[in-house]
Image (tube, rainbow, N blue to C red):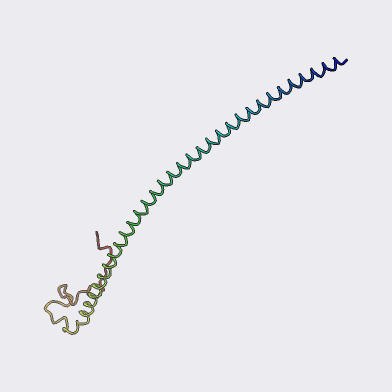
Amino acid sequence: MASSSGTSSGSSLLQNSGSEEDLQALMDQRKRKRMISNRESARRSRMRKQKHLDDLMTQVAQLRKENHQLITSINITSQHYLNVEADNSILKAQISELSHRLQSLNEIISFLSASNGVYGDSSSFDEPADSFLNPLNMPYLNHPIMASADIFQY
């Protein structure tokens, strides 16, 4: 009897030992799978990180190019603005000069129109009163002189 119970306990030790080995092998296998899975996950993470870095570098290059184009455009626009400002100053000076000339001419016309009676009647001349050659009777003398800025061509 004692031998039967000793046999059963010995076989149960063998079974337990086999089960523990199987359990250890199963745990080792799971550990290896987890390690492989972690390595693969880390590899994918590094690849995503590298792709993100590459995308950022591409974006930096594109933004630098766009920034350079904008700076060039601003410089060209600023130069055009300065040219237009210079042209505008010239035109303002020309307007001022022409306005003074026009005012002087209108004063001369006014003086000549007012002086018509001082020199006497236009009938005292040899030509008829409505003659084209008589400067005091020319109809355009009674109108102001008009000038516009578009007469200046560059």
- Total numbered labels: 0
- 3 left or right of 135 in image: right
Nearer to me, 6 or 31: 6
Q: What residue sits 74% from the left and 22% below the top?
A: 19
Percent x, y for residue 15? 76, 19
Q: What residue sits 13% from the left and 76% below the top?
A: 127
Percent x, y for residue 148? 28, 66
Nearer to me, 92 or 40: 40
Q: What residue sits 61% from the left and 30% below the top?
A: 35
Residue farthest to the left? 126
- Does 59 appear above or below 36? below
Nearer to me, 47 or 146: 47
Dividing the picture into quadrants, the one containing residue 2 is top right
- Does 37 appear above or below 79? above
The quadrant in which the C terminus is found is: bottom left
The quadrant in which the N terminus is found is: top right
- 17 left or right of 29 in image: right
Dividing the picture into quadrants, the one containing residue 22 is top right
Percent x, y for residue 133? 15, 73
- Does 65 appear above or below 20? below
Q: What residue sits 16% from the left and 72% below the top?
A: 132
- 40 left or right of 66 in image: right
- 11 left or right of 54 in image: right
Percent x, y for residue 27? 68, 27
Residue farthest to the front? 2
